[in-house]
Amino acid sequence: MAATHSGAGKTTITLGILAALKQRGMVVQPFKCGPDFIDPTLHQMVCGRVSRNLDLKMCGPDFVRSSFIKHGRDAEALVVEGVMGLFDGGESSSAALARTLNLPVVLVVDTRSCAESIAAVVKGFETLDQKINLAGVILNRVGSPRHRQLLVDAIKRHCRTKVLGSIHRDAAFSIPERHLGLTMGEERPLDETQIARLSGAINDMGLDDLIAACPLPRPPAVESNQPIDPAPAAQKSCRIAIAMDQAFCFYYQDNLDILSAAGAKLIPFSPLKDKRLPPDINAVYLGGGYPELYAAELAANRKLLAAIREWSRAGGPLYAECGGFMYLTDGIWDLKDNFFPMAGVFPTETRMKKRLAALGYREAAVHDSRFWGQVTCLRGHEFHYSDITAMPEDVQRVYTLQDGRREGYMINNTLAGYLHLHWGATPTAAENFITFCRHHKPVFSHSS
């Protein structure tokens, strides 16, 4: 499922297709092109299966092919939602992923303020890359039956691409947004009535034509680096406390699977609600999310902040990304200049900004082997609306990014920064992290 540009309605229509396929009793496996954390939660909300990120830039083609085959093996329908416009992103684009996986492409076209000129848009997309199998287009935000007829007639007259259907304008189909994108699936941004309306719209559009235009592809060739199955429970000797609540919810399922396969038992806890860390743990993992939206609640939970601070000072392994890093600073300043004290592991403050502070893929050269072993380069991405005020020079920097910036701050055995890592291309990094955690468990009773 691709689109002409961001905001064309790709996610909404993808959710409608997932819901309509599930309503037919089909087993549906969703995927998301790129590094997005939010859309996969919406997929799971609708069809009940964990959605997987397929990211060529962070993970490489072999891991992507293997993940697609493994997680789609028992499904009757596989739906991949693209990212931005079809060709946006070069080697990490939806088009590149479609070529890698031999997938047919359905193009969502936003038809607002457009009539016959839509043919020029569709013509451009069908001719720019002849290696793309453009199975058809879905016309979105159609204003009226007459509008639809103008669009369909123009495309039939000038293009070879089939119109698979159309969706009329409906405010009920819109998904609430915030500064990092759409609202997370766990927050139920669409209720059952809206999901039913979306599913109905797809069925009315012509679900049978869509299915017929997109047969399951020939499985792509797989060479190596396959996603591995989790280790048996008896072998999971490394207990990792992982922050999971409304404030900390950005995790790649593949990363969690890789940790599990390496012998980790993941113990969820809530920095919003829990007063102490889980008992008998080897490490703490703080993912990204929205700590700025829950800063008052996080700051009020002083007992857990103290437990986190004590864990770090005792040398307990602690890994934090983006929102988790913000939580470990002295505090967070919101856009209204309110200050909320946090764990104070790192002697700096976080300040929210009105504009995007950083966005994009990153490669990080690694200068400390404690967590990641002999892995010398890690891949990930940044996406945040905050920045730290200043980090003292005597705080160790573990990474050098490709633009020369030093990132990944380390104090004791606490490593944190804005970089979201994906271990798909470097699973041995996660394996070494587990080994390190097993051997560096603090001796104090942090759970008391």
Image (tube, rainbow, N blue to C red):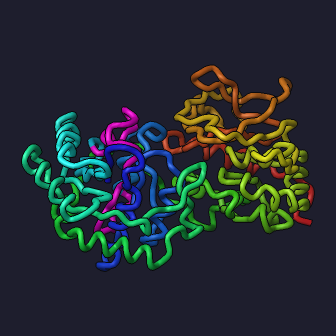
Is 116 positioned to the left or the right of 363 in the image? left
Q: Quadrant of the C terminus?
A: bottom right
The residue positioned 15% from the left and 54% from the top of the image is 150
Q: Position of residue 340 (x, y in %)?
A: 85, 51
Q: Is residue 332 above or below residue 128?
A: below
* Front one among 156 and 372: 156
Report whether residue 253 is seen. Answer: no
Q: Is residue 262 above or below residue 192?
A: above
Extreme residue toward the top, this view: 404
The residue positioned 54% from the left and 51% from the top of the image is 181
The residue positioned 30% from the left and 57% from the top of the image is 140
Q: Is residue 215 above or below residue 320?
A: below
- Residues in magenta? 70-98
Residue 430, image quadrant: top right
Q: Position of residue 184 (x, y in %)?
A: 56, 61
Q: Position of residue 145 (x, y in %)?
A: 20, 65
Q: Quadrant of the N terminus?
A: bottom left
Residue 384 falls within the magenta-colored stretch: no
* Front one among 143 and 368: 143
Is 345 positioned to the left or the right of 288 in the image? right
Residue 384, image quadrant: top right
Extreme residue toward the left, this view: 157
Q: How many marks?
A: 0
* Front one among 267 and 321: 321
The residue positioned 40% from the left and 35% from the top of the image is 89
Residue 85 falls within the magenta-colored stretch: yes
Q: Position of residue 254 (x, y in %)?
A: 51, 53
Is 252 positioned to the left or the right of 447 in the image? left
